[in-house]
Amino acid sequence: MIKQENSRFRYLILATATLKQGLLANVLAERFPKERGRIFLPEREYWIRKTHSIGTKPLFPGYVFAQTDMSQKELYLFVKEHCRDIQTFVNELTVKALKDSGITITDTIWSELTEEETAFLDRMLDEDGVERMSVGYKEGKRYVIVDGPLKGIEDHIIGNNQHDREAYLDVTFRDKRVVVGLEQKPKRLFSPDEMNDDHTLILANGKEVDLKELANRMMGG
């Protein structure tokens, strides 16, 4: 992942058809000059219930990202140069018309992320451009993140789906709510040697001890 700090690179994005964004990103990425940055799809880990495993999918459906020192004009010319390769992948968005020579597009087809969007992206993604699954527990109405990119920004979590291991943030991207991965576990798993509400003691080695049962045995019950 090319970090923004002390870097000439910035994020520019292209809106496209959700089902075609992977194809478009691959076509452009293969032809993009490495010294000018890269074109990629930010991804997030998600829980696959059918296989009980973790996979990845686009973090922002319908958008292709460029992390580059190119201007919007340069990116426009780059896309235009390869328009024959991508003309079946680009959504109507800012495409003006299809001609014999390919797609005619405006030089504003790529838009730049705001400072807030850039800071959020840099925080959430690792060096591979993937937002990893966060892990934590809920204490009252508050979420406590033990590990993962959500750690430190728990106040932005407004809800979650434990079944699908997803968290919903009060953060939007292009008017759409951001959904990220969150595995919520019982608090006692993160508090060794601490008794929980059902009078079970979780030892540091993970073993559970039922204190009521232990007390009954000691009393001859």
Image (cartoon, rainbow, N blue to C red):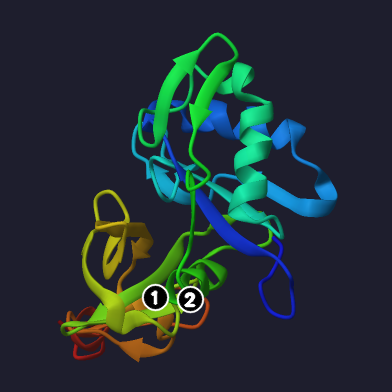
Camera-side residue of 145 and 20: 20
Q: In which quarter of the image is residue 200?
A: bottom left
Residue at 81% from the left image edge and 43% from the top image edge: 33
Question: 128 or 192: which is nearer to us?
Answer: 128
What amino acid does circle 2 point to? Glu
Element type at marker 2? helix
Label 1 residue SS: helix
User: How far across and how far down the image is residue 9, in percent?
Assistant: 69, 65
Q: Which part of the image, by quadrant, shows the C terminus?
A: bottom left
> Label 1 vs label 2: CA separation?
37 Å
Say whether residue 4 is left or right of residue 165.
right
Place residue 82 in its image quadrant: top right
| Residue 189 marker | 1
Disc on the earlier residue, 1 or 2: 2
- 154 shown above or below 85: below
Q: Residue 115: which numbered mark, if any? A: 2
Residue 89 in the image, given as x and y percentages of width and height = 48, 22
State the mark number for residue 23.
none
